[in-house]
Amino acid sequence: MDKVYQICKYNIKFDSYLPNPLHKDFIYQSEGLRIHISKRHPEALKYFEKISEIIEFPDYIGVNPNENVPSFELVKIFDDNIQIGIKLDCEQDYLFVATLHPITSSKLEHRIKSGRLKKFI
C-alpha cells in the first residue's frame, strides 16, 4: 500500500456545498498519485505541485454523480482548467486526492449550467 501524507487542511466551507458534509481535519495524498497522473493524465503533470493551491483556493466545487463513495471535485482555472477528485477512504476514514486532470472549457461550462459545479466563494 502506498504511503499517504497530509497535503493541506480541509476547508470547512466545503461542507456547505456538499450534499453530505465530509468534514475531516486534513486532505491526504498518496505517493502513487504522481505515477497515476503521469500514466493517465500526463498533460496535467505540470500542475502536480499546485494540488495544495487548488484545494486551498478552488474556483469551483461539485460532486460527481457517478461516484459510489463519498467524494467531491474541485476546479481551478490556470492556463488550463484543472480538476481534482477527492474521495473518502471509507475503511481508513480519511480524504485523499484521487486524481488530477484537465477539463475542457465546454465541459466546465456544461457542468456549471447543469449545477454539478458551483462557484466557490
Image (cartoon, rainbow, N blue to C red):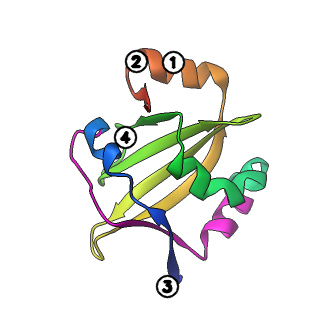
Find residue 20 and report its horizontal and vertical position in percent: 21, 45
Residue 31 in which image quadrant: bottom right
Q: Earlier in the sequence, mark 4 or mark 3?
A: 3
Label 2, residues with CA under 10 Å away: few <14, some 14-19, many ≥20: few
Q: Which residue is mark 3?
A: 1
Compared to residue 68, the image places residue 106 above or below, namely above
Q: Secondary structure at mark 1?
A: helix
Circles 3, 2 touching at the beta carbon (< 8 Å): no
Q: Which residue is mark 2?
A: 114
Image: magenta residue range: 18-40
Find residue 74 and report its horizontal and vertical position in percent: 49, 42
Q: Which residue is mark 1?
A: 110
Q: Residue at x 44, y 33 (%)?
A: 120
Circles 1, 2 touching at the beta carbon (< 8 Å): yes
Circles 1, 4 touching at the beta carbon (< 8 Å): no
Q: Earlier in the sequence, mark 3 or mark 1?
A: 3
